[in-house]
Amino acid sequence: MKHPAEIQLALFAGSDLGRWERWRVRRHVGRCAGCAEEVQALRAVGDDLREAAGEMPAQFTKDLNWTRLAEEMTANIRVGLAAGEAIARFDRPVAPKKLGLGWHAAMVVAAACAIFAVAFWSSLPPQQAQHLMASLRRIRVERLGMFVRSPALASDEVVLEASSSGIELKENGGAMSLTHPHAEGGTVSVSLQGEAGVRFVDADTGQVTTNKVYYGEQ
Amino acid sequence: MASSKFLAAAIAAAAGTIYAGVLPKIDLPKDSPVAVLSADYGDSNETARGGALLLDLHAALSLRNSSQRTIRGITLAVTAQDVTPGGKGSVTVTSLDVAPGDTFPVRVDLRLLRPLQASSAVPVVIGLDGVLFDDLSFYGPDQLSSHRTMALAEQEARRDRKYFKSLLAEGGPDRLQQQMLATLTHEADRPSLDVQVVRGGRATNFDTEQNVRFAFLSLPDSPIEPLDGMARVAGNEARAPRLEVKNRSDRPVRYIEVAWILRDRNGREFLAGSVPADLNLAPGQRQQILENTTLKFPARGGQPLAIDGMTGFVSSVEFSDGSLWIPSRADLGQQQLEHVVAPSAEEQRLAQIYRKKGLKALIAELNKF
């Protein structure tokens, strides 16, 4: 026979168990002499305590509101539990939000549209499909432009740079610059056939000098 | 052997001096109309920078005109085959007046960043690409199209000297002085721009790319009429220009250059570059010009340029017989061009003479030609 825990017997003795638990413990205590004796002993202790409380001086008991005290304790326990839950939430991975009914509906509509588009596209003759694609592409380019996604130059790219302080040819981590330390400023020019230059008047010689860098195929 | 050269270069680099093995090789043809009298490398040095060597070369060459004609211009080709095999450089000096037997200086200031392990070879070769004489004849391999470049510069110089002489004749020294002051002011006020040229159609930003149409400035005397043009623009990048031009002259044309002015979102205009084209355009014929190159305008001390509009004008034309057309002074005086286009090389040179030596020296210089 499995005996109830001591705490359950204590709660039963104080009539503090729930209805189901109270029925279950009462049923056991009715058949188990040991547990019945334990319950009697606990009730006796409770009676003694109440008597002792009744004999306490009035100034200790007259303002003591047991119900309010119990409510405060319960509230404190709830606050503690809530705080613990909040701290534990920091360590938990964020669970994805469950889709609401609105999203489900949107997904259904989107799926229906996709099915319709595929069916429409597959039923179009190839020439008309190409024409439609070309029209859509033209509208996109005219209205929105094209979206470019090339974040970096390839390492083997040859880059020419021209600024008023000099011109530079960069390639494979090496660089060749032509500078003009004996002149103030300079006129920068580039050509789209692959050359960059700067023109200046040399302060010492008074000569018009043009430095240029080129791609190799020149 | 190679390792000992490398060691010598490394020791010289550590000491901040220059190792003789890295001095440029000056390679002129045997029948060259110029000869090297001396080469002074002054305060050139080579220093180690991380895993690379930085060669800072300052070469002052003294050349002699060993031909029988007066030299007007010279172009030296600069190659660093080990470091930048995909490209080369050049130094061109124009507006020269070097009589036969006379000497003249050419300065080459070059910086070369090269890998440490490449230091055993001669890094730089200076060769001759061409010499232009006063009768507009030319000598040289012309691998860098220096003949056309120097001929155009000489034509601009002649146009501008003629203009300044006419000012002097009509308005006297005061009128010439006024014009020189205007040139110096214009040179100082002219907006300038740093530019990168990248071959290929690859843009490097994430902005939306749009086709932007060129507006064209009409130059009444131009033998070429631009009809239509477009380029793809994304943020501070412009690429893949397409132009359609028509030859409205009575002579076939083999080369044109269309200058390209960009306007930013603040309304400022910059001369960004030019679209050159080698073509074969008969009188009355139309042709499309396509270039698969990207121009990028990096930020310089602030926001990068945001391109808002483009204007083009024909800046030079070469006919099949080799003769050239350039815009007149009146063409360049148009309101939109006046503030954007730089003074010619000759105008800059004459303005420097005025600034440093005064009006009398300027008049004496004009009278030399």
Image (spheres, helix red, strand yellow):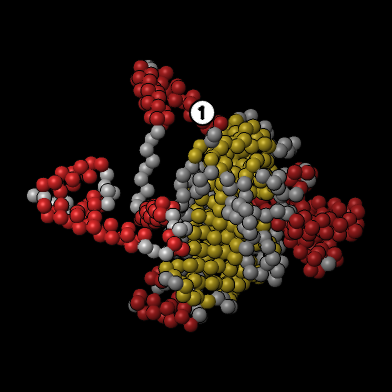
Closest to the observer, A130 or B65: A130
Q: Amino acid at mark 1?
A: Arg
> In the image, B318: left or right of B111?
right
> In the image, B361: left or right of B57?
right
Q: Position of residue A75 (x, y in %)?
A: 42, 52
- Does residue B147 appear anywhere in the picture? no
What residue lies at 42% left-to-right and 68% top-to-bottom?
Answer: B115
> In the image, B339: left or right of B360?
left
User: Which element is circle 1 on?
Assistant: helix
Q: Position of residue A94 (x, y in %)?
A: 37, 48
* Residue pointed to by mark 1: A138
Which quadrant does the N terminus of chain B fall into? Answer: bottom left
- Does residue B160 appear anywhere in the picture? yes
Q: Position of residue B215 (x, y in %)?
A: 67, 36
What residue lies at 53% left-to-right and 46% top-to-bottom?
Answer: B294
Query: Residue B95's image quarter?
Result: bottom right
As drawn, B117 above or below B188:
below
What residue lies at 39% left-to-right and 41% top-to-bottom?
Answer: A97
State which chain disc 1 sits on.
A
